[in-house]
Every structure is written in structure tokens, then in C-alpha cells.
Amino acid sequence: MTAALTRHTAFLLIVLLGALSAFALAPAAEADAAKKKQQRAKTAATPKKPRIVFIRCSSQPFPCQGSHSIVVRTGRMLIGAGGMTRRAKVEFPVRNARTGKVGKRRVGGTFRTRTRIVVRVPGNAISGRIRVVMPGPRYSNRVRVTVRRAPLPKARAPARSPIPSVGRSAFDGGGMWVWYLSRSERGDPEAMAARAAAAGVRTVFVKSADGTNVWSQFSSSTVAALKATGLNVCGWHFVYGNDPIGEARASAAAKTAGADCFVIDAETAYEGKYAQAQRYVRALRAAVGDDFPIGLTSFPYVHYHGSFPYSVFMGPGGATFNLPQVYWKEIGDTPDRSLQLTYQYNTVYKTPIFPLGQAYDAPPASEIRRFRQLSEAYGARGISWWVWDFARPADWAALGADLPAIAAPADPGWPTLALRSKGDLVVWAQQHLAGAGHSIAIDGDFGAGTQRAVRAYQAAKGLTPTGAIDAATWPTLLRETPREPNWVARASKAARAAANGKGARAATAAANRLPAVNGPTSASMRARRYEIAGGPPRRR
């Protein structure tokens, strides 16, 4: 009995001690649990860093190069990564085309799922490591990609007809150019249509892109709204030649948005860039088709700009409308003199001329009216005006005034090319001589070889063999089909030769980078002068 009581007492003591211990430890346990809960809440509140799991070249619009990590400039790539939201961007290493400095560029994309995003590779991207960036900022791990140039579209066969056949288009009739839509009747389609109708304007040329950047003002909805008023709507794009494939893609976006036509605005930045011009024109035509109406607007006085590749932009497969910028007041000439020189030197490119006149900087109304009369007398089917943003009520009134027709002006004449002449006019003549079967260097330099070829051609055609290309020779010579040099291949070959001795990789890289100046010998010529000092208030 005593032993049993002892055991019972001991048991009670143990229970009592356990209860006391639990009571004593309860506050500590609660504090520990609260601390753990706080840590879990803090961890949950801290956003996770994204992490790239895979990258993959997309087959659109260019074919992949065999490896998932090889991508093409202006092409698409797929990135799989966890921890992303809709605000995620992908950071690429890029090189500034003008300065050569390496930097970074972040681009957004389209999400296929929560963990997969498709982005377009920047036109100036270079090989290196990419990463996903989230607001905060929070960075993912880095993954290396190899960046290559977009493949050059295959050259098309030159047109068989010596003089392109151009039907009716949005270029016909009156046109007005728009730099910023918001400054043109505040972008109100109905107000624009009313003002255009009063001035006899049936087509608006709205800026659609600059360099590789597509402008948001040229959207499909805006184009549709303008077209619903009865206006024709065309896009125009200021190009530089630093990324011709990327620029061609931006140009083609105008057709996708519903444009009735498109104009290439190439000026000083394109002087000396024959290969870039050829690459751009080929890519653009491959994107929009052979029949889509494309025009070129540039310097009107061709003989001032021997290094500008008119022969590429208006050559086989290029623009089939020519809109020279005949801003007579800014140039310092009269409408008569400006149009005479424009027709004299532009007619040889066999592309119908649709003069672009000046409706800014307060030209006299009498000169606007004279320009209209002369252009129609020269046979222009359409005249357009720069620019809606700065046109005054007096300018609009002059555009819409009823005018009597005038007699055709005197023959504007033809350029004369002879020994020691240089420039793109010589390039164009040499292409036609080569197309006629003469073995001749297409170098833009009228040397002894070109002179012999001209004499032989003149003799074969029953012309006086003077050895100079003049008013008697041009009309016959222009019936020949021009032979277009492969300027891209020439530039790549020259770059590869210049890198000789620096290794195969250096030679390949050099061949892929087009030199800043390339093409014929004349591509290095300086402009005789620029018609408009400083240029009109526009373009950028």
C-alpha cells in the first residue's frame, strides 16, 4: 500500500511538473511561432527574381540559323522565364551605329503564356548576354545569344520594259504632306477632308516611320478614318541607311496599316550608300510586292549630288514615282528655274515626275499658282505640297484657286556627259551602255573607256559619234535595259579584303558590315552644294 502510494505520488508530481513546464514555455513558443509567421509573410511579400529557363529563335519572319541561341536582327525570339509579369522587358546589348559605342536596350514583347514572351530583336543588337528585367528593378540570370544580320532578299530580274508603265494611283491629282497629324486640324479626319476638298487635295502623305521606328500616328484605325472621308492616304518614311533591313520593315508597315501608296524620303544620310540603298529597296519590294506604288522624294537638282544613289532608288525594282522637293523659295530660284532644272536632270531616270512644291515659309501666292501651272504644263499628273503643319490660309487659297492652263514651257534640255564627268548620272548612263552589250566599268567616272563605248554605241545607232552623251543620245540610250551592279556584293568583298590578315572571323564580320561609303568611285564625291541651306523645318 505504501509503495503504491509512493508511485502514485511520483506520477502526480511528474504531471504537475510537466504542466508547470508547459505553462512556463508557452510564451516562448508563441513568440517563436509569431516570428516564423512574420518571416513567411516577409518572404511572400518580396517579389521573386525572374529566371530564364530557355531561349529560342522564332522562324518568323526569317528562318532560324540552326541553333536556338542564334537570332536575327529585327527577327523574333521566344524566351521562357519564370517570375514575369506583363511589365517584363528583355535587355539586349546594342551598338550605336553613329558612335560605335556599346550600350543596352530594353524591349517589350507579346506574352504567349505567363512564362513565355516573344520579342523582336533590335536592329542594332549585337551578340552578347541578354536578361529579363522587371520593375524594381529585378534582373534575371543572363543568357548568351548570337546575333546575325537579316538575310538579304534575292535580287529580282530587271524590268523588261525600258520605260516603266505607271497607271493611275494615289499620286495623281493634288496632295498635301503631313509631318505631325496632331498639328494638322488636330488630326480630325472630317476637318482635314473639308480643308483638303476646298484646296483640290485628294491625297494626304502622313509620316509613318523614321529610321527603324514606326510612328504610332500612322495606325490602321487612323488610316481607315481618313480614308472613310474619301481621302487617299499614303505613308512616308525618313531613312538613314544605318539598318536598311530594319528600315524596310518599318516602311512596309505602312502598307499593313492600309496605305494607298508609300514614299521613301532619302536625303543627305544616304549619300554614298549604294549597297545600303540596294539592300533596302530589295527588302522593301520583297515585303510589299512589285505592284505596290512607291515613290522617292529627294534633292531636285541631281547634278549637285553626284554620290546620291538615284540609280538604285529609281532603278529596276525601285520607286516608280519621283517626287523631287522643288522648294523654289528656299532654294533661291523662281518656280520657272527650279522646275526647268528639276526636269532637265530627273527625266533621265525614266520615272514619272510628280513635283513636291513649297507651302511653308510664306511663299508668294502668285508663285504657288505659277508652280501649279508650270507643273501641269510639263505634264505632271500630280502635284503635292510640303507641309500641312505650316501652311497658311493664304497658301491653302492659292492651292485651290481656279487657274487657266498655260502653254507648254520650252524644252528643259538634257544633261551633257563627257570626258571627266563624274557622278550618279554617269553611273546611270554606264548601266545602260552595259545593258546594250558594251563591256564597261560601272564606276561613275566618265573615262576613256566610257568614251569609246559611247562612240561605238552612237555609231551602231546611226548617231553622230561625238563620244559625249547629249540631247541626241539620251532618248535612244534610255531605251536600253540598264544592267544593275550588285553593290552589296561589291561592298562586302571590299570590306573582306580590307580585313585580310586579321583572321577569318574578322573578315566575315567586316563583310557583313557595309562600309559607310561604298559603290562606284563617284560615291565618295562631296555634294556640289545643298539647294536648301540647313533644310526646311522637317523630317525628324
Image: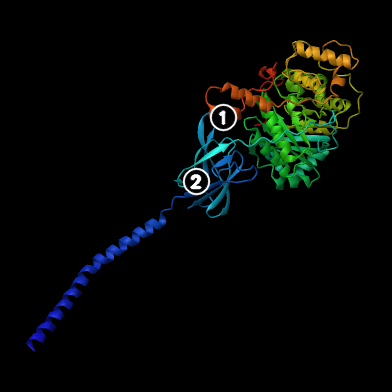
Which x, y percent locates residue 269? Answer: 65, 26
In the rendered structure, which amino acid carries the disc numbered 1?
A: Ala
Q: Name the residue beneath numbered marker 1.
A: 509
Task: Give the quadrant of residue 37.
Answer: bottom left
Q: Which circle's residue, 2 or 1, is located before the other in the chain?
A: 2
For residue 239, which quarter of the picture?
top right
Quadrant where the image shows the C terminus:
top right
At numbered mark 1, what does the secondary structure look like: helix, strand or loop? Answer: helix
Q: Which is closer to the viewer, label 2 or label 1?
A: 1
Which sits in the foreground, 346 or 480?
Answer: 480
Instruction: Report how far apart the C-alphas of labels 2 and 1 lie in the structure.
Output: 28 Å
Residue 4 versus residue 469 in the image, above or below = below
From this viewpoint, is residue 403 visible?
yes
- For disc 1, the neighbor class at 10 Å (few under 14, some 14 to 19, many from 20) is some
Q: Which mark is residue 532?
A: none
Residue 479 location in percent, x, y? 86, 24
**Percent x, y for residue 57?**
58, 45
Above or below for 464 versus 297? above
Quarter of the rendering occupied by the N terminus: bottom left
Residue wearing tag 2: 132
Task: Give amino acid for label 2.
Answer: Val
Q: Nearer the viewer, residue 219 or 72?
A: 72
> In the orientation shown, which residue stands out farthest toward the left?
2
Neighbour class for label 2 at 10 Å: few (<14), some, many (≥20)? many
Q: Which element is circle 2 on? A: strand
Chosen colour scheme: rainbow
Q: Is 136 situated above or below 277? A: below
Where is residue 273 shown, x and y percent of the image? 66, 25
Number of numbered tags placed on the structure image: 2
